[in-house]
Image: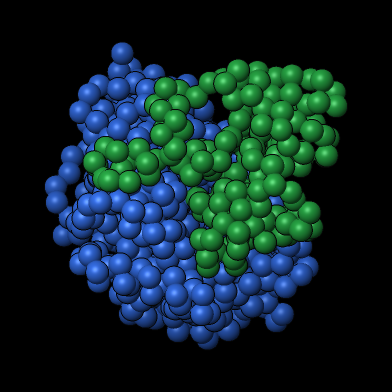
Amino acid sequence: MGKTISEKILSAKSGKGVCAGEIVEAKVDYVMVNDITGPAAFDEFDGLCVDPLRKKIVLIPDHYVPNKDVPSAIQAKKMRDFATKHRIPNYFEIGSGGVCHQLMIEQGFVAPGRLIVGADSHTCSYGALGAFATGIGSTEAATVFARGLLWFKVPESIKFTVDGKLRKFVSGKDIILNIIHDIGVEGARYASMEVVGTSISSLPLADRITISNMGIEAGAKACIIPPDRKVDTYLKGRVRGTYKWTLADDDAEYSDERFYDGSEIVPVVAKPYLPSNVAPASETPVDIDQAYLGSCTNGRIEDLRIAAKLLKGRKVHRGVRMIVVPATKEVYDQALKEGIVKIFSEAGAFVSGPTCGACLGGYMGVLAPGERCVSSTNRNFIGRMGAKDSEVYLASPAVVAASAIKGRIADPSEVST
Amino acid sequence: MRGRAWVFGDNVDTDQIIPAEYLVTMKNDELAKHAFENALPGFASSVKEGDMIVAGRNFGCGSSREHAPRALIGAGVSCVVAESFARIFFRNAINIGLPVIEASLEAEEGDFVTVDLAKGTVKDERTGACKEFQAYPPFVMMLIRKGGLVPYTKEVLGCRR
């Protein structure tokens, strides 16, 4: 019987042939923590009696940096102190860093066939490059610092095939929201998703990262897209160390297979309060108070370009606050270089430096009671971006930009043909 | 284990269990003050030591924050019984010693619930309804017996306690 990508990677990393359902201890390539999850990991690590595996550890403050208040400043300081004390080479201070998942990819930690864990649920993003990557807790991150190993239940895999030419303005975000709408927020619980098809291979890497990023919103442990040339091209001159593609066998066993016609997919939004509550943007013309473009889901240069193209020469609607948050310094610098920051600024948008910011209701754009935001982020739970009766509508960068212009949720075709 | 039930529905996410604005501490009792602050105001002030949570499907979905099970431990919650759990919450709970039981129990707020971990049964005392739950896999049982992932790791590394 053939194996899925997940089974193959976990077999290689545990040194034995494993199948779905088995529990194994497997060798981890990198373990990442952020300023929210790191401090607890450091406390737990202090109780262990070994030096940390310095080169496996990646420390990325991003959630509440630049420091939001004194408690968050203390957390960020704990992270800096841990990096200094243990001489951890891969610590990314503000000014050189950004949102952890985009940074992990940019900095070449992520590559096909690798096993990466991160104390952040959106670690599954790295599946877009053919890695097995999954979110873990702080305590287990501490044990990986010490041993470089972690226990995993080898997940079953569900195969999603999306074939067909995508319509204009349809993005990775629309594809993954359609999938979550279809299978529900626990449709892939404990499973690994493998996402394939001509629609997927036609997408730029940025959109694939959006798809893998939101696998967790269907409950998935990992969300893997088979690597191809586009991944190699991106990693050239960027990747740390060597890598090899891991692909599924033709006769791999999947617990379910689902098929979608990519040409039928339209720009959508996910209405409050679940990412599965999906409807076409064109049929959801609700007024908005804020439009948010950024995050590990959609804060890449490709996302900013799409929004800037729609906003160029236009204005953000009166009564709408548009907030743009490039995911990393690299994205920020590129946006400056291409004149994209200027376009946003001239349109009346506020552009901040890289941070997780308001995505999780932290700061830099939290919502007042009753306010409504269209957002390129990943979660629209109760109170996610602020007050408990505020509302978040998840959407692609194109829908966010079009909505910012119209003052209500809008299909991008309303603004540009 | 016996406790009073707090009943929740499906898809209780970790943002509801502990809102992100309070993720600036890892102290269980500090976190507990804000448990379910938006989703169920008043929970933190009226929850009592030993109380249990009885929930529907996909409990603990969303963010990986270990603060969520820690807030529940801090609040005195002795056990979470849910029809199903999101995987990161499940792992975190096991790793830090919060019992999580996968069983579909119909309970009403305030019912007394008993859990027998050894027998694998959970019972609502008011209705008398009894459900069996599946034992943890051997590796997970071993972790629980050793007191969680950190004690296990210390043993493997040969750390002195």
Residue A329 sits above or below residue A257 on the image: below
Q: In front here: A167 or A362? A: A362
Residue drawn at point x = 30 percent, y = 67 percent: A82
Residue drawn at point x = 66 percent, y = 31 percent: B1
Task: Using the rendered image of the protein, determine whether residue B97 is visible from the camera's viewpoint.
Answer: yes
Quadrant of res B146: top left
Task: Using the rendered image of the protein, determine whether residue A314 is visible from the camera's viewpoint.
Answer: no
Residue A65 sits above or below residue A159 on the image: below
Residue A110 sits above or below residue A348 on the image: above
Residue drawn at point x = 33 percent, y = 78 percent: A95
B55 sits to left or right of B86: right
Residue drawn at point x = 36 percent, y = 60 percent: A42
- Extreme residue in the front direction: B161
**What hue does chain A carry in this figure?**
blue
Question: Which quadrant holds the C terminus of chain A?
Answer: bottom right
- Give the letter of the green chain: B
Q: Position of residue A11 (x, y in %)?
A: 26, 28
Q: In front here: A217 or A171? A: A217
A404 sits to left or right of A75: right
Q: Position of residue A397 (x, y in %)?
A: 53, 62
Q: Position of residue A27 (x, y in %)?
A: 24, 39
Q: Count of labels shown?
A: 0
Q: Position of residue B55 (x, y in %)?
A: 70, 37
Q: In front here: A73 or A93? A: A73
- Extreme residue in the top direction: A1
- Extreme residue in the right direction: B126
A283 sits to left or right of A174: right
Question: Which quadrant holds the N terminus of chain A?
Answer: top left
